[in-house]
Image: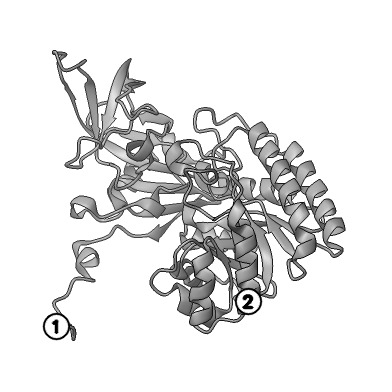
């Protein structure tokens, strides 16, 4: 972790006075360190890495990926266009930008046709939809191999409870359908987990390599296999670095095996999202008040630390009880006590300190005064990307810290921004 000055109260108050709170603060040095770790992991010939940009699509994050030679995995037409605006080349030769989707929404098909990016399809029906729209280019197939999972069930990426991909038993039908429509299959893809332990992830990659290795001789146009994302990031312990060495060996072995099975040089890809960006950003909130509830027949009482950030700024704790480390920044902090940290939203679930059963789990923190700051760490993945305008609140600004200089990379949204899409226009369709 680089020494950025968020625990310098003078710096922090000056920044908060200038742009208000809450805001997200990105450390470019931390992001670059994660990029280098992934590049080292995929440095052998025939290996490649993509960034799952759904985790954070801020333009300066994307430009850092572009400058580092990282490719892109997009999941919507607009994500493709954001990658294009950040300077990524379009087209499928090579497929620097890949679209992975289970459903085509909004402009996705038009963007595939116009930008000629490689579509990676999660259902058999999408093959027919693309062909009917006039597409005759290469495709990828995302497979649900029947195993793999996330850190909670809501994030399952493989197995019976996952909506993603073509079930492994239906893959022969998908291959036959693509052949009948004249859509050459250039990529096999599976995402075997976004939250398992490192050993489990490595084992899943080995299982997937065995599965795909048997398929490649039957797919003469296929030149790449993607193992998806899933590199672990420890939200509990920032010093706990994943040992990527075993995975690197597995990827190299898989690339060699695939090339031998297919009789041609194969490319093996991974596409982390969270691993790249999670530790790079901190959510900065201001403490507004302290208050307490008393125990009764309905449950225990709690001491609440009220802050001006909520799940509109970082939804992961409210959505599935995700843990995020917290730091109180105060010139004169009081004694450490268990605090339930809660936000401003008109919603009982707007509490940052929850366990994996989504129950309130107070956190031992120094006691701050109103006006002090609370830092919520590891907010770079799915913080700004999943933010919202609930309660008509503007999305928080984002600050980029690089080489001792702070840059505003997105301003706070105003009411005019929120209302910009509202209209009252007559439609041609009538009853």
Residue 183 showing in the rendered view = no
Q: Secondary structure at mark 1?
A: loop
Query: Which quadrant of the structure image shows residue 282?
Result: top left
Q: Secondary structure at mark 2?
A: helix
Pick the residue in front: 344 or 208: 208
For residue 182, what is the image quadrant?
Answer: bottom right
The local crowd at label 2, few if under 14, some if 14 to 19, many if 20 or more residues have their Cα within 10 Å, is few
**174 with respect to 7 (left or right):** right
Q: Position of residue 311 (x, y in %)?
A: 30, 43
Of the numbered discs in the image, which one, if any, rests on residue 61?
none
Color scheme of the displayed model: one colour
Residue nearer the viewer, 32 or 274: 274
- Picture coordinates of residue 106 (x, y %)? 38, 72
Which residue is at a point 22% across and 19% down the rendered structure image?
A: 302
The residue at 74%/66% (across/down) is 219
Residue 116 sits above or below residue 291 on the image: below
- Asked whether the beta carbons under mark 2 and mark 1 sit within 8 Å of each other, the answer is no
Q: Residue at x 79, y 49 (%)?
A: 254
Q: Earlier in the sequence, mark 2 or mark 1?
A: 2
Residue that mark 1 sits on: 430
Please say whether residue 293 is visible from this viewpoint. yes
Q: Is residue 7 above or below residue 63?
A: above
What residue do we see at 24% from left, 66% from top? 417
Residue that badge 2 annotates: 180
Q: Nearer the viewer, residue 182 or 413?
A: 182
Does residue 266 appear to the left or right of 339 in the view shown?
right
Query: Would you place residue 288 above or below residue 42 in this image?
Result: above
Residue 98 x, y percent position in the rendering: 59, 66
How many marks the image carries: the answer is 2
* Front label number (2 vs 1): 2
Q: In front here: 233 or 19?
A: 233
């Amino acid at each position: 972790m680089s020494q950025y000055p968020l625990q310098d109260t003078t710096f922090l108050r000056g920044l908060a006075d200038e742009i208000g709170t809450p805001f997200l603060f990105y450390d470019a040095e931390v992001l670059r360190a994660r990029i280098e770790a992934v590049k080292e992991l995929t440095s052998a010939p025939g290996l490649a890495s993509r960034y799952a940009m759904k985790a954070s699509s801020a333009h300066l994050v994307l430009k850092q990926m572009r400058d580092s030679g990282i490719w892109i995995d997009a999941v919507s037409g607009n994500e493709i266009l954001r990658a294009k605006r950040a300077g990524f080349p379009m087209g499928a030769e090579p497929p620097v930008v890949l679209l992975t989707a289970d459903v085509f929404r909004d402009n996705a098909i038009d963007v595939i046709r116009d930008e000629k990016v490689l579509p990676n399809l999660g259902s058999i029906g999408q093959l027919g939809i693309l062909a009917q729209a006039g597409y005759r280019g290469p495709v990828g197939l995302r497979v649900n191999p029947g195993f793999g999972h996330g850190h909670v069930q809501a994030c399952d990426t493989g197995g019976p409870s996952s909506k993603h991909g073509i079930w492994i038993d239906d893959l022969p039908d998908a291959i036959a359908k693509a052949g009948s429509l004249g859509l050459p299959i250039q990529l096999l893809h599976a995402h075997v987990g976004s939250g398992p332990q490192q050993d489990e992830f490595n084992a899943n990659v080995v299982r997937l390599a065995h599965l795909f290795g048997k398929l490649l001789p039957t797919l003469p146009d296929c030149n790449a296999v993607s193992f998806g994302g899933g590199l672990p990031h420890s939200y509990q312990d920032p010093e706990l670095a994943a040992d990527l060495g075993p995975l690197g060996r597995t990827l190299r072995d898989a690339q060699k095996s695939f090339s031998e099975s297919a009789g041609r040089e194969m490319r093996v890809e991974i596409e982390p999202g969270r691993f790249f960006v999670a530790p790079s950003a901190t959510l900065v909130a201001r403490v507004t008040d302290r208050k307490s509830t008393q125990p009764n027949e309905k449950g225990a009482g709690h001491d609440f630390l009220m802050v001006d950030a909520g799940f509109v700024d970082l939804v992961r704790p409210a959505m599935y009880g995700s843990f995020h480390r917290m730091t109180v920044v105060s010139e004169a902090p009081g004694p450490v006590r268990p605090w339930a940290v809660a936000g401003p939203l008109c919603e009982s679930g707007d509490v940052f300190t929850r366990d994996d059963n989504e129950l309130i789990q107070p956190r031992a923190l120094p006691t701050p005064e109103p006006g002090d700051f609370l830092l919520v760490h590891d907010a770079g993945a799915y913080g700004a990307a999943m933010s919202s305008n609930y309660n008509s609140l503007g999305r928080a600004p984002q600050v980029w810290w690089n080489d001792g200089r702070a840059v505003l990379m997105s301003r706070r949204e105003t009411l005019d921004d929120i209302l910009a899409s509202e209209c009252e226009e007559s439609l041609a369709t009538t009853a």
